[in-house]
DNA sequence: CTTGACCCTCACGTAACGTGAGGTTCTATC
DNA sequence: GATAGAACCTCACGTTACGTGAGGGTCAAG
């Protein structure tokens, strides 16, 4: 007849949990000791110790106390289902975190290379841009875009940003000179723009249509403005006219920040 | 003189946040509108809108509101530091999650292959075992162990678990027959045990010493019991005597669940 | 008979809001 | 000018899984 019942402190010590945690489990009815001493001290029987170990293990697996309660008390909560669900949740979470991490690293690198004195607003733009990406591309497309970015390399990306700036400046001059968007001079610019867009999309039609949708819904001028100076008044409309005249498609911005 | 100030609802709509969130930011003094209408309605000026965008962006990066406040209001909070810190936090979190995910997947697979009808207690054991591992091995060692497990393959792991069972049974018989732990027969068993241990450690001395520490501090009989039936009374002591007599080392269990 | 190590029950604090409750104000329409 | 609906206001409690006291009994040892 060895000590068949433990008091809270002892149980806490053995399981590595705190007394407060055991109290909490008692409060919510997840693990209530079946007996008490006359003085009201909790006494945990061996079956309750075992239950606590199960609880602690499931807790380590990241399950919520409610899920654990279900696992332990309701037979229709099969372990496999719960594990499956938890795995899916975790995987989603991991991909989310990874994406976030890459973004953070990219931002930090930009902050570090003090060639451009990065302001909070630039950062804001980048973040917004990246998040918008998530709204217009599927996760697989984001994967492809990321790979494409890696292929091109950071300097080529910066290079194309510069080319966009020059191109938009050229469009602006054309507009101010009153040139017809369908004229040969402007169409040469449109063709250049097309190739820059295609460099980004990598020729993927899904990515291209996502980009088009993004420009339509967010306003192309806002998208393009993120990657440099704001566009002159009416320039985006002029640009779309030129692109339409070229018969290629709608209009679009640049690769990732 | 266009609408230079926005009301909460309008601002919420534009930023995709909720009115409650804006109220919250006001409550904690993170973003308080500088003006109010006579009726007390909040009026956000353009500078405040910009600040809100910065807040929202940093929020998306996973920063806490307190960190954000620091970034925005205190010059000594450099962006780079904050980003660096956040990256480190995220990376740690990701490796943690990944480890957890592997564990979950392994458990689910075991649950699925209904060859063994897995009980909650088996699961509890596995979880505890895996967590103990984290206490005795460094992250790098855990990496190596995981790679080694992949090399060996799941069937070999199961195989060695069976071999451990047989080996312990043989030790048990020797003990009951009163054989000297240093006798040739028992030493043959010790040698077999040694090779099983080495199969697990892959010869890595760090892993070996971690294992020894684990057996000492957790009690080797508890460790070994996890991977099969509980050990007979006194068997662990007998086993350690045999291993000491062999001059190899202390004692130890089996690869990962 | 006191001291210290336990134990008990409230009950507030955490992070970042969600979700009403109950009441005022704005805006449009009749 | 009355009225309806939308939008605004201020409390204030709920969420998760406990941490951290406050204030007070219980128990064995000295």
Image: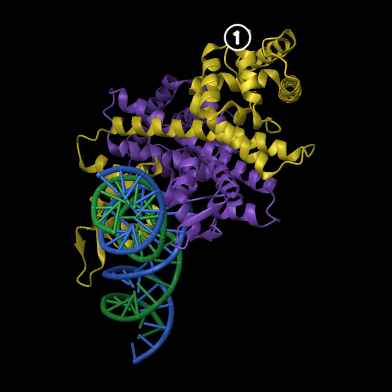
Chain colours: A yellow, B purple, C blue, D green
Q: Residue at x 61, y 34 (%)?
A: A103
Image-based side of C26 in relation to B33, left or right: left
Q: Quadrant of residue A240?
A: top right
Q: Which quadrant does the C terminus of chain A fall into? A: top right
Q: Residue at x 47, y 63 (%)?
A: B38
Where does residue A146 sit, x and y in percent of width and height?
Answer: 60, 23
Say above or below: A159 vs B244.
above
Q: Which residue is at a point 50% across and 27% down the rendered structure image?
A: A217
**Is the N terminus of chain A in the top left, top right, bottom left or bottom right quadrant?**
bottom left
Residue B68: image x %, image y %?
58, 51
Element class at badge 1: loop
| A142 sits left or right of A192 in the view | left
Q: Nearer the viewer, residue A43 or A162?
A: A162
A106 lies above or below D13: above
- Residue D3 percent coordinates (x, y): 23, 53
Which residue has dot 1 on it? A248
Q: Chain of mark 1?
A: A
Give coordinates of residue B81: x percent, y percent.
68, 48
């Amino acid at each position: 007849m060895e000590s068949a019942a433990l008091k809270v402190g002892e149980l806490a010590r053995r399981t590595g949990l705190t007394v407060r945690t055991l109290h909490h489990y008692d409060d919510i009815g997840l693990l209530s000791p079946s007996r008490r001493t006359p003085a009201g001290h909790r006494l945990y029987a061996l079956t309750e110790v075992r239950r606590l170990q199960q609880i602690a293990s499931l807790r380590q697996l990241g399950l919520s106390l409610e899920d654990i309660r279900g696992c332990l008390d309701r037979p229709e909560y099969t372990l496999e289902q719960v594990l499956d669900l938890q795995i899916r949740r975790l995987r989603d979470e991991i991909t989310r975190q990874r994406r976030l991490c890459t973004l953070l690293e990219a931002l930090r690198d930009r902050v570090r290379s003090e060639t451009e004195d990065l302001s909070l607003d630039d950062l804001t733009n980048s973040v917004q841009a990246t998040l918008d990406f998530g709204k217009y591309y599927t996760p697989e497309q984001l994967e492809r875009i990321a790979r494409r970015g890696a292929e091109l390399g950071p300097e080529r990306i910066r290079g194309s940003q510069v080319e966009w700036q020059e191109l938009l400046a050229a469009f602006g001059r054309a507009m101010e000179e009153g040139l017809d968007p369908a004229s040969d001079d402007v169409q040469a610019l449109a063709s250049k723009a097309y190739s820059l867009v295609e460099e980004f999309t990598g020729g993927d039609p899904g990515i291209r249509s996502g980009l088009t949708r993004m420009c339509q819904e967010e306003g192309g001028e806002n998208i393009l403005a993120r990657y440099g100076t704001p566009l002159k008044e009416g320039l985006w409309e002029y640009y779309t006219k030129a692109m339409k005249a070229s018969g290629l498609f709608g209009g679009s911005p640049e690769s990732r920040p």
